[in-house]
Amino acid sequence: MKTPKKVNLAITPTPLEIVKYQDKKFLIKRDDLTGCELSGNKVRKLEYILADAIRNKADIIFTCGGEQSNHARATTIAAKKFGIPVKLFLWGSDKKIPSGNLFLNKMYGAEILFLNKNDYEKVNDIMQYQREKLSRKNINAYVIPEGGSTATGIFGYFSFILELMKQTDLNRVKGIVTAAGTGGTSAGMLAAVSYLNLDLKIVAVNVLYPKDVFTKKILMLAEAINLEFDLNAKIKSGNLIVLDGYSEEGYKNISSDKIKLIRNFAKETAILFDPAYTGKAFVAYYENYLTKNLGMKYIFVHTGGIFGVFGREKEYLI
């Protein structure tokens, strides 16, 4: 197996905690504690991606996402640590008083191009076109796709499994549950499970794409890391479980019943979930595992997203 180089950004290992909610205990891996401004799962991917960007002598970094993208915010801040400017291609619109991740992007000086939904569907082509324009001026733009979901980036969640193995006996665990947007986090874990031949389910709570598209994305990314780093593993597609239907209100929205559970959970445990990812994923975890007393058999991964709460105060406090 080849191991890619990395830079050190994340505060790891993150804690694996036993939490009690409604008199039911469960395991939670606190990847919301990977840092402060760099909080969340994206920083694990960026440790490897930025090492590659530096190796390729990037003059500027391009990436994309929604206007409240955790990945865009983490990329902006991480790149600034190495003096690399960032241009963001965001699905949404500018705000007179930005909040959450958008506020931080502006604070850290990212250049931002806002795109409507139709244009955002062609965002990869748009980024590539602008990269080529800069290339003609001898400016090297390094393009990171949505969510940092590249073979290099998702090695961060291959390494996550190795970290988790030092914290608990994974032979006593049945599965790991995580929110999933672009699928990179789940794909990295699935590749590791396959490589290590662990009988462990990777449960991805889909919040963004149609189920068939999403499933294909995860399996393709897992196979990409398998090939890129000579894992010589057979990807265990049967170990992937996709839980669908927990984002029917849309990626940028969250229903009042989900917010009620998030709020009640926060009051009881002092742990807060975001509206786009972890809140929806925890609803799925609660319904499918916690209420069935399977919390000590299925680990819930808190992937961060705390800044996405800001700007949604009215919804959270109703």
Image: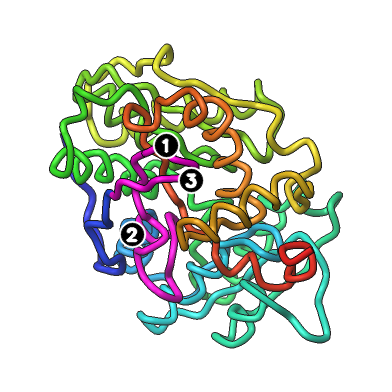
Q: Which residue is mark 1?
A: 24
- Which of the numbered marks, if any, corresponds to residue 273? none
The amino acid type, in three-letter code, at marker 3 is Ser
In the image, farthest residue toward the top: 238
Q: Which residues are magenta?
A: 17-44
- Which of the numbered marks, if any, corresponds to residue 52? 2
Label 1 SS: strand
Up the image or down, 175 lies above or below 228; here it is above
User: Relative to residue 311, is residue 235 drawn left or right?
Assistant: left
Q: Which residue is mark 3?
A: 149
What crowding class fits label 3: few (fewer than 14 Cα within 10 Å), some (14-19), or many (20 or more)?
many
What crowding class fits label 1: few (fewer than 14 Cα within 10 Å), some (14-19), or many (20 or more)?
some
Q: Residue at x 71, y 29 (%)?
A: 245
Q: CA distance from mark 1 to mark 3?
A: 34 Å
Label 3 SS: loop
In the rendered image, residue 232, in percent from the top left (x then y), is placed at 22, 21
When asked about the image quadrant of residue 37, the answer is bottom left
